[in-house]
Image (spheres, rainbow, N blue to C red):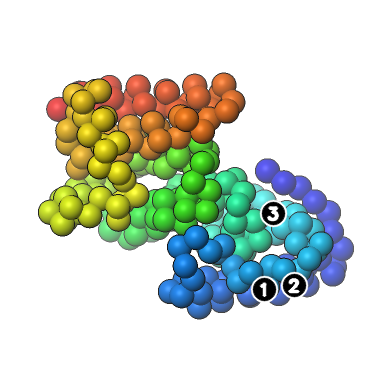
Amino acid sequence: MRAAGRGAWGWALVAALFAAGVAGQFVLRAHRPVAAPVAAESVIAALGGLRSIAAEAVWFRAERLQDEGRYVELAQLASTLTFLEPHEPEVWSYAAWNLAYNISIMMPTPEDRWRWVLASMKLLRDEGLKLNPHSAELCRELAWLFELKLGTDLDAAGATYREKWRAIVEDVRARDAWTELGMEKEKMAAIETAYGVTDWTDPQMSAVYWALRGLPYATEAHDRAFLRQILQQALVIYAKRH
């Protein structure tokens, strides 16, 4: 994580960026092209050399909110980080983790929890990976989310997550619209042939898919080891379930 000590002017800048980031998320989401950064390029350009300083200040504030357990505020602030550093995978991982593992468990019902978990998944898959398509880190986070959060009962709402995911996959399969889930049919077919697994409604299959998707981009030994571990564990859990 980052750490920085900035003056009072830095916090004023953070406040302005926070307002711009949150507003920008809602205003620009429906209009920006898929490959565009999360924030308006003109706003980022206007920051110039202050952009990195602002990012450090936002990271500092985010860490304080995390220490204080103020996760909903942290989720809002994380959108500012994606505004400032859209091509830093760490930013997307940080924001997605908070949604899936901190905020979700504060919700009163399994259905409410699922909305936050799904939001985390979409943030990684539909935004983070669109801007960082060769990120082993984001593939790993997505694979881990499917293996652990959806694919096991570590979360008490795990059964609900699997039911919701099954409905999504069955709908996508009926329409042959796998691209909506960020999946390529050729890669799915190769996985079925290589591992003898076919039930894509099982979240462990998605864990396998994203782990394999990230392996070619894992340049560090520990990243490759982590992805292979997710792959092996997902296959074991899948085999026990089927």
Q: Residues within 10 Å of mark 3 (few under 14, many from 20)?
A: many
Number of the front mark, 3 or 2: 2
Return the mark for residue 231.
Answer: none
Q: To which residue does mark 3 refer?
A: 59
Query: Mark 2 touching mark 1, by CB under 8 A?
Result: yes
Q: To which residue does mark 2 refer?
A: 46
Mark 3 and mark 1 lie on one chain; the one further toward the N terminus is: 1
Is residue 155 in view? yes
Image coords of residue 112 (percent x, y) = 33, 60
Q: Quick one: which residue is furthest to the front in this view?
A: 186
Q: Quadrant of residue 115?
A: bottom left
Q: Quick one: which residue is furthest to the left in this view?
A: 174
Q: In terms of secondary structure, where does tag 3 sit?
A: helix
Residue drawn at point x = 69 percent, y = 54 percent: 59
Q: In terms of secondary structure, where does tag 1 sit?
A: helix
Is residue 160 in view? no
Left or right of residue 29, residue 23 in this image: right
Whole-Å distance between the Cαs marked 3 and 2?
20 Å
Kind of residue indicated by mark 3: Trp
Image coords of residue 217 (percent x, y) = 51, 33
Q: Establish if 182 lies above or below 224.
A: below
| Numbered marks: total | 3
